[in-house]
Image: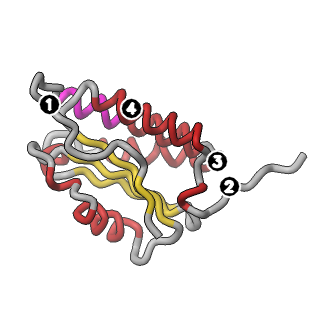
Amino acid sequence: MTKLMRTTKPSKFFTIEEKQKIVAAIKEAELQTSGEIRIHLEKKSSAPVLERAKELFYQLGMDKTGQKNGVLVYLSTEEKLFAIIGDAGISKVVPADFWDEVRNIMQEHFKEDKFVEGLEEAVKMVGEKLKAYFPYQADDKNERPDEISVGR
C-alpha cells in the first residue's frame, strides 16, 4: 500500500474539505471569546520559524486586536515546521507552559501526518484558554479573518 504524500504547496496543502474543518474550528472557538485565532501557511520559512512567525504576526495585524489577544499558528509546509505566537494580552495570563502544551499536541499529530487534527485540537485548546480570560462580549466583533492565509 502506497502512502499518499501531501503537496508542500501552501494553497494545496489542505483539501477544500480540510480547510473547511479547520476554519469551522476557528469559528467555533471564536464564538466563545473576544480573542482572534489565525492560521498561516508558507512553503518555506525565509527566517528561523519563530522569527518568521513573529514577522507575520505583525504583517497580518494580529497585534491589532482591542484586547491584545490574537494568536497566530504558522506552518512551513515544506519544512514541516511550525510556531505559535500569542499577543501580549494572552501571553501574560496563560500558564507559563501553555504554549508548550499546544505545541506538544500539534507535534504528536503532525508526526503522524495528521495536520488537520493537530490544528483543530490546537485551535480548540487556544479557544478554551481565550474563553477563560477573554470571554465573548455582546458587542464583540470579528477583528481578523478566520480563513487560513497563505504566503509564498
Q: Amino acid at mark 2?
A: Arg
Q: Looking at this view, is 70 or 18 the one in front?
A: 18
Residue 143 colored magenta?
A: no
Measured from the top left, where is residue 65 in percent x and y? Answer: 14, 47
Point out the tag, 3 or 4, that comes first from the N-terminus.
Answer: 3
Q: Along the horizontal axis of the image, is 112 left or right of 101?
A: right
Q: Residues within 10 Å of mark 3 (few under 14, many from 20)?
A: some
* Residue located at (31% from left, 43% from top): 37
The residue lying furthest to the top in this view is 138
Please state the total of marks drawn on the protein image. Answer: 4
For label 4, the SS is helix
Residue 152 % position (x, y)? 47, 70
* Residue drawn at 31 percent across, 33 percent down: 127
Q: First in sequence: mark 1 or mark 3?
A: 3
Q: Which residue is label 4 attached to?
A: 124
Q: Are marks 2 and 3 in contact (CB under 8 Å)?
A: yes
> Are there few (<14), some (14-19), or many (20+) residues within 10 Å of tag 4?
some
Q: Nearer the viewer, mark 2 or mark 1?
A: 1
Task: Give the residue at mark 1.
Answer: 140
Residue 96's spot in the image, x, y percent? 24, 45
Residue at disc 1, secondary structure: loop
